[in-house]
Image (cartoon, rainbow, N blue to C red):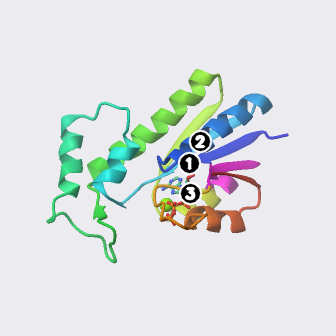
């Protein structure tokens, strides 16, 4: 039923569960799996530490994370909740770490056709574009992501993608 599945990840636990579901479906339907990460420009040190959980973080990356706790690190325009602007080195490390973790997981589970992309821009636009460019027939993503403001059932990215997406869309809580 599904030939091609897109699973976008921001490193959140919701996205992790979405990748598990996407891998399961890719195996069931012998489908191609595409992993997508849209670079994160602003985050708290806690969010980055959460993304890199259960991994050995190189010393230079630990220093970059430490910089995020430093009050002199750049605060994003309209920045809130302690978010700081990530250095390009940290952004790149996080992106590569995330797609590698997802691709390794899919490969270990037996998905033979898996590709990944790291891109930049507005996450909901990039996800919609990827569904069209990659001609996927199923999108599997988290209902929520890293933001996780308590009380909201759905994040802004999943909400916007859901209402603009032309293929089947499975949201994993
Ligand atoms: P908000 O961002 O509005 O504070 P949130 O972070 O809780 O809310 P969303 O951002 O909507 O929730 O995340 C929902 C899902 O969208 C994630 O589980 C993930 O699948 C996808 N997603 C969000 N951001 C990205 C990103 N930068 N790259 C790839 N996928 C993303
Ligand atoms: Mg988010």
Task: Look at the picture and state if 162 lies above or below 7.
Answer: below
Relative horizontal placement of residue 33, taking residue 104 as reference (left or right): right
Q: Which residue is mark 3?
A: 144
- Residue at the right extreme, as displayed: 1
* Pointer 3 or 2: first along the chain: 2
Whether ligand 1 has any atom under 8 Å from the Cβ at mark 1 is answered as yes
Residue 94 position, x and y percent, is: 37, 45
Label 3, label 2: how far apart the Cα atoms are? 11 Å
State which region is magenta.
130-142
Label 2, label 1: how far apart the Cα atoms are? 5 Å
Task: Look at the picture and state if 43 lies above or below 4.
Answer: below
Q: Residue 69 appears in which quarter of the rendering?
A: bottom left
Q: Which residue is mark 1?
A: 14
Q: Are marks 3 and 1 in contact (CB under 8 Å)?
A: yes
Q: Residue at x 23, y 56 (%)?
A: 68
Residue 120 position, x and y percent, is: 45, 58
- Residue at the bottom extreme, as displayed: 78
């Amino acid at each position: 039923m599904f030939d091609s599945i897109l699973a976008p990840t921001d490193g959140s636990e919701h996205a992790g569960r979405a990748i598990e579901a996407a891998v399961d479906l890719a195996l069931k339907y012998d489908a191609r799996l595409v992993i997508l990460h849209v670079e994160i420009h602003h985050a708290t040190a806690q969010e980055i530490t959460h993304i890199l959980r259960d991994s050995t973080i190189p010393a230079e990356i630990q220093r970059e994370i430490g910089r995020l706790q430093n009050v002199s690190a750049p605060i994003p325009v309209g920045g809130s909740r302690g978010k700081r602007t990530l250095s390009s080195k940290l952004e790149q490390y996080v992106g590569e770490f995330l797609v590698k973790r997802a691709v390794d997981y899919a490969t270990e589970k037996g998905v033979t056709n898996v590709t990944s992309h790291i891109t930049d821009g507005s996450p909901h636009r990039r996800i919609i574009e990827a569904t069209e460019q990659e001609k996927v027939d199923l999108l599997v993503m988290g209902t929520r992501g890293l933001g996780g403001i308590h009380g909201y059932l759905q994040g802004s990215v999943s909400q916007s993608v859901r209402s603009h997406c032309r293929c089947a869309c499975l949201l994993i809580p």
